[in-house]
Amino acid sequence: MTGAGSPRSGSGRTPVGQWRLEDAQAHFGEVVRRVRTEGPQLVTAGGRGDVVVVAAEEFRRLAGGATGAALVAALQASPHKDIEIEPERSRLTIRGAEP
């Protein structure tokens, strides 16, 4: 759909509103309001769904921690955490510089 954002049927994290880029720019306050009340909003440019506007809380949840804490926790919880893994090392040949 086009226009000033028309809700579509959807649930969960599926965008529920769709906006043409021009309309989203002209009515950005309305886009933000709908993100808060209806959920993610899809913004299209040239007929393609290029961007989804989501609430900051949802973005943080989706982005996760950039610290790798979840990976560390998973490795520490492994029943095989005491297994030592020795990486295989190989020597690389170094070539001389070519003129």
Image (cartoon, rainbow, N blue to C red):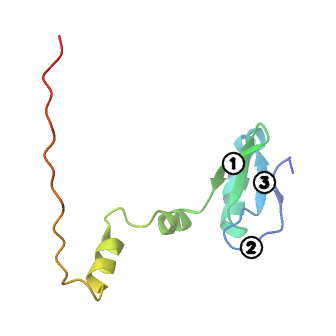
Write down the quadrant of residue 79 in the picture.
bottom left
**Residue occupied by mark 1:** 28
Which residue is depicted at the point 82% across and 49% down? 4
Assign a secondary structure to mark 1.
helix
- Which badge, 1 or 3, comes first in the chain's sequence? 3
Q: Residues within 10 Å of mark 3 (few under 14, many from 20)?
A: many
Assign a secondary structure to mark 2.
loop
Which residue is depicted at the point 77% across and 36% down? 46
- With respect to residue 48, does 10 lie above or below? below
Q: Which marked residue is nearer to the observer: mark 2 or mark 1? A: 2
**Residue occupied by mark 3:** 18
Residue 24 horizontal/vertical position (percent):
73, 45
The extreme top residue here reads: 99
- With respect to residue 22, does 55 lie above or below? below
Residue 53 horizontal/vertical position (percent):
63, 55
Cα distance between the residues tagged 2 and 3? 14 Å
Residue 6 horizontal/vertical position (percent):
84, 57
- Three-letter amino acid code at disc 3? Gln
Residue 52 horizontal/vertical position (percent):
65, 54
Q: Nearer the viewer, residue 88 or 68?
A: 88
Q: Residues within 10 Å of mark 2 (few under 14, many from 20)?
A: few
Circle on res. 11: 2
- Which badge, 2 or 1, comes first in the chain's sequence? 2
